[in-house]
Amino acid sequence: MGALAGYTYALEQAGIRFLNIAGTSTGAINAVFLATLAKPNEIRSIKLTDVLDNMPMEKFIDGGRAAKAFVTAMQEKPDGFVDKIPELLILAYDKIFKQKKWGMNSGDEFGKWLDQNLHVQHPDELKSILQLAPNVLKIRSGGATYQACENVEDKKTEAQRLENIHNNIKLSIVTADVTTQSKIIFPEMAELFEFKNNNHLTQFTRASMAIPLFFEPVVLTAHPNQKIWNEYVSYQGSIPTGQKCYLVDGGIMSNFPIDIFHQRKYVPLCPTFGVKLDTDRTQPNETAKIIKFLGALFDTARHTSDFNFLHKNDDYTQLITYIDIASHKIPKKIKTGLFNLKSKTEDVSKFHWLDFNMPTDKKVELFTIGVKAAHDFITANKGTPFNWDHYKTTRQNLIDT
């Protein structure tokens, strides 16, 4: 999250403002706070950093001693779960077989934190804060987009598109409904479910962060109207038993939902920037060990849809910043062998996705990495700088062909 916040902060300091915002999993946390902390034409990232800096992540591991032992073991060495098989068996029996919770941590503490810090909860409240005053958005006269307009009708169309953007600024949080095998985008598809509580944005974000088996899924009641299920997600089956739908981390379907804002028929009036906390398939996955093989299976399932979109729309390579967090390595002594009696030194990732007790200096370092990545993106310290006119020309050529 720190790198995403740093990236956002740097772009806002460069004068860029964000209209539509989308996120999955960790990105959903950044997205929901960016969308609700201030108006879209205002600086929001400074408030975001304050919120994230005070996030009590260690409390989110609320599954007891066994869950905490598992997290610690996984950080100490890549296959640390092997050393914690007894704890895993306890978790599996208590949470899965006995309680059927489908997760080692309830996610309740995370939900409470969201309730306390999200001052906007209902979709109607969200719509209000995202609404801009009249005439805030304008097309720059003399810009490349206007120069491409050959007649009054073309300019009228652009004006209509600008008005449509102005009136439909939105937040998109991606989660996966494993009950109906559907990609759910909140709050756009909130009509598919019945909510007993009014903390809608908390439930949307909590669902998007429900890492399978690590956090319990969010269970929502499905709306009984089969017609709207078909309209939103083309689900034509029967409504789930008891009308219960199990929602988990949207990253299992789409970990980089940049396709949500894609407009194939037009040259966009503003760019869609994306930031990824890894690089795309720069080397083959390791599959020699079972943990590596299982990781490769999971990565293939969650990335393929996004890879296919970027392959078919390679113009998006001009819009994406890649922050290779895994490339930041430190030497670490790893215990090996029977009963961990042996050890060896390996280069391991400095930042672990399960580091829920990250010290302040590492949070600051992650933030700085994000700032630098954004700086490089717009100033071309690495590669070619982003050029808006060049990108619009690329899109126009794609439409023409």
Image: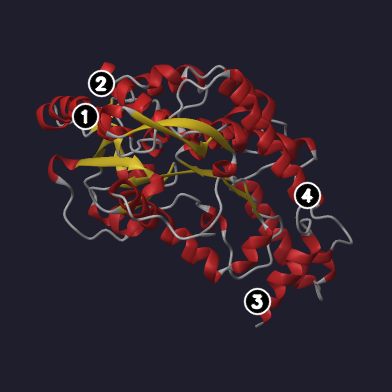
Q: Position of residue 289 (x, y in %)?
A: 31, 50
Distance CA(mark 3)–CA(mark 1): 54 Å
User: Could you tell me the amino acid type at mark 1?
Assistant: Leu
The percent position of residue 65, horizontal first and vertical second, equals 27, 16
54 or 262, which lies in front?
A: 54
Sequence order check: which comes first, mark 4 or mark 3?
4
Mark 1 or mark 4, which has the lower sequence index? Answer: 1
Front residue (pair 221, 298): 298
Q: Nearer the viewer, mark 2 or mark 3?
A: 2
- The amino acid on which the numbered mark 3 sits, given as a three-letter code, is Ile
Q: Are marks 1 and 4 in contact (CB under 8 Å)?
A: no
Q: Nearer the viewer, residue 163 or 271?
A: 271
Q: Which quadrant of the rendered structure holds the C terminus?
A: bottom right
Circle 4 SS class: helix
- Say which amino acid is labelled 2: Ala
**Local SS, label 1:** helix
Q: Which sits earlier in the primary sequence, circle 3 or circle 1?
A: 1
Q: Which residue is mark 2?
A: 66
Return the x and y of residue 27 as percentages of the image width and height.
Answer: 52, 39
- The dot on residue 88 is 1
Q: CA distance from mark 1 to mark 2?
A: 7 Å
Labels 4 & 2 near each other (Cβ < 8 A): no
Q: Which residue is mark 4?
A: 378
State the image coordinates of residue 326 (x, y, percent, origin top left).
54, 43
Residue under label 3, please give it.
399
Q: Amino acid at mark 4?
A: Ile
